[in-house]
Amino acid sequence: MPEGSVRFVCCWEYARNVAPIRDDAYGWASSKGDETIVGWLIRHAVLFKAIDFPQPWLDATDGQRQRTLELVLPPPLQVIPPSEILERIDGVIEGAERDARAAGRPVPLSVIRDSIAWSLGLMDPTGGPGMIRNWPFPASYLVQINFSMLGRDGAARELRSWVRKEAQGWLPVPTAKAAAIPYDPLKWLSTLRLDAARRAAGLTVSRTLDELRAFATRFPVPTGSPVLPDYSSVGAWSTATAKAKRQVLEFEADPVGFERRALGFWRFP
């Protein structure tokens, strides 16, 4: 699974384990919608045909997964020619008109505005209407480069100069431990969910571990499964369960901080 997918899935799956979100997802998202990625996605999933809460990531279609990742993890650099900009805008307007006819009511202009912004990969750094205040990568730019006037070398020189100046307002991407892909938190969460299932089935931890090892042998993954809780001892299983419970509480108490740590991106404070 690509790194970006793992990071988002960590946020999504932990949200599914938080009782206040699970019990009233839309109500929670309405209060957190301009602060968290998960909250925004809960409210806009239908509009963008993305994964729909509390749908598990593994149950989503390929199309839902692709669309979701396009929304929450846009490419760090993309060049959109003017002709494609117009095509994307036309596509959003046509879609809004189609949805309006199907629903029998007009689509709000604010929704169209947000849809166009997303279609162009634009996020409002000031946290404007419909955008996320704490989005970890809020600044996108439309850059016009006049090669005919500047020439190849001049255009490259001007662009490098602008990037150096603009970069002074942004923090560097985390490295070392802070940049680690969150496989361990997902493994802990797998343990927590399996622990609830094995309790309901009346199985011991030792028996559950034996079954997991047998499963891994019958259905081997060539590169290994970093989230399969195939721990070597009952103590390690219990530790993982406790860590997952703490992570769930952390998401409930500070979803913005949880998302930032899991996604590994930081905006300028």
Image: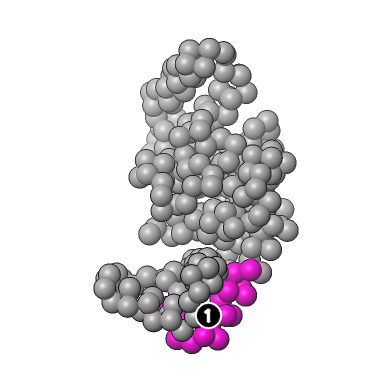
Does 179 sit above or below residue 108? below
241, 97: nearer the viewer: 241
Magenta: main secondary structure equals helix
SS at badge 1: helix
**What range is drawn magenta here?**
230-245
Task: Identify residue for label 1.
Answer: 237
Residue at horizontal 42 percent and vertical 22 percent from the top = 91
Residue 262, percent from left and from top: 57, 61
Residue 133 is at least partly visible in this image: no
Q: For the residue marked with disc 1, what is the amino acid? A: Trp
Residue 32, percent from left and from top: 69, 44
Residue 122, percent from left and from top: 54, 35
Q: Is residue 132 magenta?
A: no
Residue at horizontal 39 percent and vertical 58 percent from the top = 2
171, 38: nearer the viewer: 38
Q: Is residue 242 magenta?
A: yes
Residue at horizontal 66 percent and vertical 69 percent from the top = 246
